Amino acid sequence: MNRVKVALVSAAIMLFSSMNIQAEEPIVIAHRGASGYLPEHTLEAYKLGIEQGADYIEPDLVMTKDGFLVARHDIYLSTTTNVSNKPEFADRKRTIGDKTDWFVMDFTLAELKTLRARQPFPGRDKSFDDQLEIATLDEIVALVLEQQAAGTTVGLHIEMKRPDLFQGAAGASLASRLSGEFARILENKIPMYFQCFDGNFVREIAPLTDAPIVLLVSGTYNQQTQWFDLGINPDDYYDYVDGFGLNKALLFDSSLKPNGLVQRLHQAEKVVHIWTARNDALPEGVETPEQEFKMLFATGIDGVFTDFPGTAVKIRAEVADANTN
């Protein structure tokens, strides 16, 4: 990492610590809000995540036809909204690659605001379906500022989805557009990270922003070992990123024994945030959410994305108490 970036990250860590983000403990990140309970990426899901004690909330960003940043995990809309019940949008359905659906970049913000969110996960509460709006980045920032004014500090862990698809709608370059948004967030003293799976985009945006940068890594499944390989050389990104957001399987071998990856990245002074811990989707060999969180925290991670932030906060406190007694 270059000296300028080191200085910026050090300053950011000092700032976050001064705002009572618990740097000595792993941060809890409400994944798409408290999405285990409410339709994801709605203001209500983010609010619930904050109420449950999350240190950060995670908006995934996509862009509308008229250039507004909104929170959706996917570029298609059928699984998380009621778009299929809207006859006025029937002609918007089209095929991109092997996916036939309604796509966010074909809708203006005003049109998206007529849709309502749905819970996409089977087995989760559907009673709030078709009631809650899609949230914009501006609305999410306003929510965080409201919390800040009320005495609750919460950060933003922002992900850009598919940056290759949204360059045109951004006006200028997407990296420039986002860096401007991040500057305003940081000016308001909101702790934040920026994360992305696209390594080329990470390289492009890193010199344009003071926000700490996290490269997301899925890993690759190795048929021979029947487990996951990292699939990248982290050293190739050390000059551009401040941390890695890892598929949780990458921290272990096939017997769920820690493989030392967290320590390797910590030696390079990189943070490690892992995804995604879900109470209702436990890995094979793990019997309870408590067992999984304790196993993850024991690896030394710096943060965990979870659909159930209240559980993570509770177990984190129990682990901290056990370590001090």
Image (cartoon, helix red, strand yellow):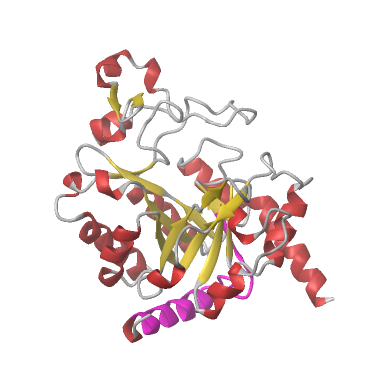
- Relative image position of residue 101 (x, y in whole percent): 35, 24
* Residue 117: quarter of image: top left
Query: In the rendered view, does 11 fall on the left or right side of 162?
Result: right
Q: Taking 14 as reference, is 162 above or below it?
A: above
Q: Farthest residue toward the front?
A: 224
- Total of numbered circles in the picture? 0
Q: Residue furthest left?
A: 172
Quadrant assignment for the C terminus: bottom right
Query: What percent of the width, then of the height, locates residue 216?
Result: 45, 57
Which residue is pictured at 48% across the width and 77% down the height?
13
- Locate the N terminus by quadrant: bottom left
Instruction: Compare residues 98 and 270 and report the one nearer the observer.
Output: 98
Indicate left or right for 237 with 91 as reference: right
The image position of residue 295, as x and y in percent, is: 73, 59
Judge from the rendering whether residue 29 lies leftward or rightward of residue 136; answer left or right: right
Q: Does the magenta stretch include residue 236?
A: no
**Nearest to the observer: residue 73 or residue 285:** 285
Visible residue check, residue 94: yes
Above or below residue 175? Residue 74 is: above
Whether 141 is drawn above or below 120: the answer is below
- Magenta residue span: 5-29
- The front one of 147 and 176 is 176
Q: Is residue 248 in sight in this rendering?
A: no
Residue at the right extreme of this rendering: 325
Residue 272 position, x and y percent, is: 54, 66
Q: Which residue is drawn at 14% across and 55% down?
A: 172
Tell me which corner region of the image, top left, top right, bottom left or bottom right, holds residue 53.
bottom right
Q: In this view, does 48 lie above or below 299?
A: above
